[in-house]
Image (cartoon, helix red, strand yellow):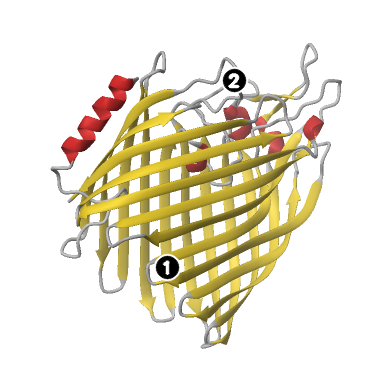
Amino acid sequence: MKKVMASAGLLALGALGVQTAHAQLSGGSDKPWSLAATLRGFYDDNYNTQPDGPNRVDSFGFEVRPSAALDLALDQTTLKLSYTYSMKYYDDRPSNKADHSHDFEALVNHNFSPRYSLDASESFVIAQEPEVLDRTLSFPLRNNGNNIRNNGSINFHAQITELFGVVLGYANTFYDYQQSGPNSLSASLDRMEHLVTLNGRWQFEPETTGILGYQFGAVDHTSSDVLILNNTFPPIVAPASVRNNYSHYFYVGAEHKFRRDLSASARVGLQYTDYYNDPTTSSAVGPYADLSLSYNYIDTGTATFGFRHSRNQTDVTGGTTGTSTSFTQDQESSTLYGSIVQKLTPKMTGTLTGQYQNSVYNGGSVNGSADNFYLVGLNLAYQFMPNLSAELGYNYDLLKSGLPNRGYDRNRVYLGVTASY
């Protein structure tokens, strides 16, 4: 293990001779494209995200992460593209020591006129880490393999009058987990999610916009694998599609700029969910909220905070032990998140991120039980020259679960350099 860490350190020092930048691609203003390569050595004390016991294993390793980006601004159109490949090598893993992930991001914005515009985005990842695969953390455990998440969205903005405008949008998210079989991740989480949005926007004041909105969401489980609803023999099973649902969101909100360095956005309302394929559960009504605050507290420091409350899917099926076919449909989750980016010296920047999510299970034998998930990250980046930086970081994950053999904690530390052109 020490040899791997030492080798990664030597590679990192050797990379200092290359023109570099920090982890995000950031080419100079003289060209619309940029290239970068990051090399990290790391230690992960629970890379399988397992509870304490014989299945909990640790490892030193290294990561190689090249990336490329394009940022093109035309008269009426802006185009941004990026691609990042990552290879993580775990020295103490007995087999399949390397994980490979891919991240492709695209954003295009076109202004037809000062009053009408269209934006579209695309995010495609093949990954293993839960916070990368699923931002709702419906499955908060790491899963080896080529797991896929694809998200695309398009939004049309129209300023009908000086004071009134509308936004019409559609988003589609696709999940495909490599694990298959009865009660597998494929059975519980492979799905297509659709979301249609219609917002009316009123400009009450130059710095205040009111919002009246509606969204329609549909979750379509796509796996051919079955869910096992109890442990009798023979077991009672159901198709994955029994967890399909429709959701209607009704909300009001506002966006307000308190001053040049402080702005906030809020949307609050109700979510009505129809489990139309489940013979034991018809519907559920709950609160919906999406709040955010951005504060540039000094010229070299930015803080962002937010809160979300909504229903999301879950990997837990929650089948019962008798002849009942009741099972867990989803979770009701409250998420509090924040980040602080502070320039400590002209060449050093610190970043602190944190997230807490409380998720309560809906239905089945685990009805009312909850997961509490904590994520904390700290990163220090030092800019040796405009295209050269080094970084030191730490991440801590903690899952406290009301279900047995599910909770875990995880510590990760890393040291690396990034070169860009």
Give residue 145's position: percent from left, percent from top: 45, 26
Per the image, label 1 sits on a secondary structure element best described as: strand
Farthest residue in the front direction?
A: 345
Examine the image and state in which quarter residue 30 appears.
bottom left
Query: How far is disc 1 from disc 2 in space, using C-alphas?
Result: 42 Å
Query: In terms of depth relative to the viewer, which is nearer, 268 or 199?
Result: 268
Quadrant containing the N terminus is top left
Q: Which residue is mark 1?
A: 118
Query: Is residue 24 at all visible to an observer of this figure?
Result: no
Seen at 73% across and 30% down, the residue is 403
Dot 1: within a 10 Å radius of its alpha carbon, few (fewer than 14), some, or many (20 or more) residues?
Answer: some
Residue 181, disc:
2
Residue type for callout 2:
Gly
Q: In the rendered view, does 384 fall on the left or right side of 120? A: left
Give residue 219's position: percent from left, percent from top: 63, 45
Please report whichever mark, 1 or 2, sits nearer to the chain's N-terminal start.
1
Residue type for callout 1:
Leu
Query: In terms of depth relative to the viewer, which is nearer, 328 or 255?
Result: 255
